[in-house]
Image: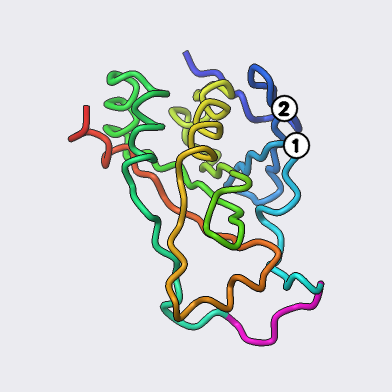
Amino acid sequence: VSHNFYERETVKGNTITYKVDYSLGSLYQISNINNTRVGELMSLKDGSIPTKPLGIGDELDIASWVPVYCAFLETFTPEEIRVLAQNNEVLRIGYALNETGAVLEVRFTMLRDRPHLYNIPPQYLEKLETKLKSTVSYFIPPHMAYLREYKFITVSQDCSFKSFLDRL
């Protein structure tokens, strides 16, 4: 039975209320209503807009994928992961990071025409958000130390459910 949790402006987990932005056509962007940074333009701590754009290939590396895998494996049952993997589902996770690479905020993006994704209960996203915030961090390499002058840093990662199959 297909149930779309996200075709509304807000949706509640157990303790977190999520704002759903479906103005982007084929996507749902699902964000904690308390988020103020993820999805916003990065600005410097003095409030100015950076004049130097991020260089090509200047991407931050996650410190370890293990916390991401653990968060998904603790949230979804093996059967749920198998079904999502079989349907080639991908959940995009956007992060707002502080100057040390720790996660401040999380936002989820999913395709709107994917019933297996929009059937994921908001309580699962809440559990994922809580785990990701407390365990995931990014490495800021020396040549990108200028990012420490930003109020926050935004990055995203695509989490393919197929990548979790060999960890079940």
Position above or below: 105 against 117 = below
Can you name the residue that lies furthest to the top here?
Answer: 1
Q: Which mark is residue 113?
A: none
Task: Tell me which numbered mark, 2 or 1, is placed earlier along the sequence.
Answer: 2
Instruction: Look at the image and give the residue range highlighted in magenta.
Output: 47-53
Q: Nearer the viewer, residue 69 or 85?
A: 69
Position above or below: 53 against 9 = below
Q: Position of residue 19 (x, y in %)?
A: 73, 36
Q: Nearer the viewer, residue 114 or 147?
A: 147
Residue 3 placement, left or right of 82: right
Q: Nearer the viewer, residue 75 or 98?
A: 98
The residues bearing labels 2 and 1 have C-alpha atoms spaced at a distance of 6 Å
Element at label 2:
strand
Q: Position of residue 115 (x, y in %)?
A: 47, 29
Residue 105 in which image quadrant: top right
Residue at numbered disc 1: 33
Magenta-colored segment: predominant secondary structure: loop
Residue at numbered disc 2: 17
Can you name the residue that lies furthest to the left here?
Answer: 166
Residue 74 included in the magenta stretch of the image: no
Position above or below: 91 against 139 = above
| CB atoms of marks 2 and 1 within 8 Å | yes
